């Protein structure tokens, strides 16, 4: 009989990824209601995400036109007001808009 041996595979994770896996393993927990939670990793230098302002603005204008066309613009505006009241979004003054910030497009 021959004994098969396997060669251990070297990890292909970067040091940053290894750290994230270790942090996950150390902080993941299941709550009594069955949900899980863990601490998310923080990166020293996150990768560039591109021009999110143009995409968010285009999506907003597209949604606004769609809501206006189907007569739901007042409801759309009320929903945006609700987001603002709940601190889920904020109005950014024109002189504070930065290309290196991340802007989330409005989802309907």
Image (cartoon, helix red, strand yellow):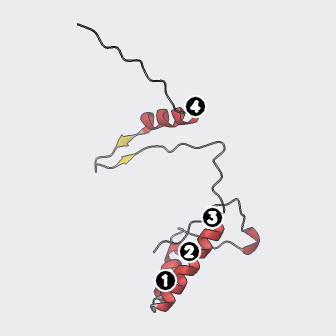
Looking at the rendered image, the quarter that the C terminus falls into is bottom left
Q: Residue at x 61, y 43 (%)?
A: 43
Q: Farthest residue toward the front? A: 1
Query: Which residue corresponds to the image point at 67% horizontal and 71% vertical from the top-left?
Result: 92
Mark 2 neighbour class, 10 Å CA radius: few under 14, some 14 to 19, many 20 or more: some
Identify which residue is drawn at 63% across, 73% down. Answer: 91
Secondary structure category for the residue under label 4: helix
Reading the image, the residue beneath label 3 is 52
Position of 90 relative to 39 (above/below): below
Which mark identifies residue 15? 4
Label of residue 59 in the image: 2
Disc number lying in front (1 or 3): 3
Between disc 1 and disc 4, the foreground one is 4
Dot 1 or dot 3: first in sequence order is 3
Residues at badges 2 and 1 in contact (C-beta under 8 Å)? no
Percent x, y of residue 7: 41, 18
2 and 73: which one is in front? 2
* Of marks 2 and 1, the one in the foreground: 2
Q: Are marks 1 and 4 in contact (CB under 8 Å)?
A: no
Quadrant of image for the N terminus: top left
Q: Earlier in the sequence, mark 3 or mark 2?
A: 3
Q: Nearer the viewer, residue 29 or 105?
A: 105
Determine which of the numbered discs, if any, sits on residue 76 in the image: 1
**Quarter of image, res 45:** top right
Point out which mark residue 40 bears. none
Left or right: 96 with respect to 87?
Answer: right
How far apart are the alpha carbons under marks 1 and 3? Answer: 22 Å
| Residue 56 position by quadrant | bottom right
Across and down, in percent, residue 60 comes to 57, 77
Q: Position of residue 63 (x, y in %)?
A: 52, 80
Q: Is residue 76 above or below residue 26?
A: below
- The span from disc 4 to disc 2 (Cα, nearest Å) is 37 Å
């Amino acid at each position: 009989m021959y004994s098969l041996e396997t060669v251990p595979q070297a990890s292909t994770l970067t040091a940053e990824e290894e750290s994230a896996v270790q942090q996950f393993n150390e902080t993941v927990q299941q709550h009594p209601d069955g949900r899980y939670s863990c601490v998310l990793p923080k990166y020293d230098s996150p990768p560039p995400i591109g021009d999110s302002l143009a995409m968010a603005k285009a999506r907003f204008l597209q949604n606004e036109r769609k809501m206006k066309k189907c007569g739901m613009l007042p409801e759309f505006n009320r929903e945006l007001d609700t987001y603002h009241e709940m601190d889920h979004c904020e109005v950014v003054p024109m002189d504070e808009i930065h290309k290196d910030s991340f802007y989330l497009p409005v989802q309907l």
